[in-house]
Structure formats: C-alpha cells, structure tokens
Amino acid sequence: MQHPARFLAADRRGVAIVEMALVLPLLITLLLGLVCYGQYFLIAHSVQQIANDAARAAIAGLSPDERSRLAIDAAGAAAAANPEIDAGAMQVAVSQQGAMIAVRITVDADARLIRFPLVPMPSPQIARNAAVLVPGAGA
C-alpha cells in the first residue's frame, strides 16, 4: 500500500484550477484596466480634437468677439456629434493675445468614465488646449 503523502504529492488533478484561481483575478484586473484607460484616452483625444476644431473655426472671425463665438459654436457642434462627450459638462475658453488665438476645452468626464476600484485613474477633469495664428495679423 502506498503512503497517502506520496499519493497526494503525485496527484496532479486540480492543479490547473488552483493556478487559474491564483492568476484569473490578476488577468481580470489587467483587462479592466485596459478598458478603463482606453476609454479615458478616447475621451481625452476627443477633447483635443474638439479644441483643434474650435481653434480652426475661430480663424474665420473678423473681430475677437466673432472669433470667440465661432470657436464656442464649433466646440458645441463637435461635442454634440461625439457620444463620449457630455456637452453640458464642457467649458470653452477663448483668448487672443496679438496674432495668437488660444482655445481651452475643459470637460468633466466623471459621469462617462468606467470606474474599477483596483485601477487608479487620472482626474476626470480633462483639459486640452489648441492655438492658431490669425492669418495676416502679423506676429
């Protein structure tokens, strides 16, 4: 008769389930981290594109007030067309110094972001800038 300790040491049944139980939580955490950060980068990239579009639209204005209005309208239209951006949680700031027009878009993405407690995320306040030169204004 074989000793029970030797029998258990040689028995490999159940090893895979134990290994899976140890590794699966880590893999799920990594997968959810990829999803969370992927969505964050999607929103951040979308906010940058909205800022770029608004800055390009501002060039068409003839006065600083018209440039500001054009930039705000373009940002609102771009945000409305993007399902990841909540237009109500977006703020647009337009400034002009000399021949440079700067547009700053700030979005509170807290309601849109997927959260997972084990994944540390950056601030849900996403702010991006874009700047353009006014043609013919001379720098």
Image (cartoon, grey):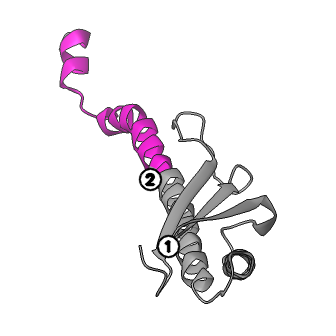
The residue closer to the viewer here, 61 or 123, is 61
Q: Main secondary structure of the magenta part?
A: helix
For the residue pair 26 and 69, the one nearer the viewer reads as: 69
Asked whether residue 1 appears in the rendered view, the answer is no
In the image, residue 8 sits, relative to residue 72, either above or below, namely: above
Residue at image position (61%, 81%) is 58
Measured as percent of width and height from the top left, residue 47 is found at 58, 66
Q: Residue at x 43, y 79 (%)?
A: 138
Within the magenta stretch, is there residue 20?
A: yes
Q: Residue placed at 42% from the left, 34% from the top?
A: 21
Q: Which residue is mark 1?
A: 99
Q: How many marks?
A: 2
Magenta stretch bounds: 4-33
The image quadrant of residue 94 is: bottom right
> x, y (%) of residue 85?
68, 67
Q: Quadrant of the N terminus?
A: top left
Residue farthest along the right direction in this orientation: 88
Q: Position of residue 126 (x, y in %)?
A: 59, 52
Which amino acid is tagged 2? Leu
Picture layout, residue 135 above or below residue 69:
below
Counting residues from the start of the chain, the first of labels 2 and 1 encountered is: 2
Is 63 situated above or below 32?
A: below
Q: Which secondary structure lies at badge 2?
A: helix
Residue 101, image x, y percentages: 55, 70
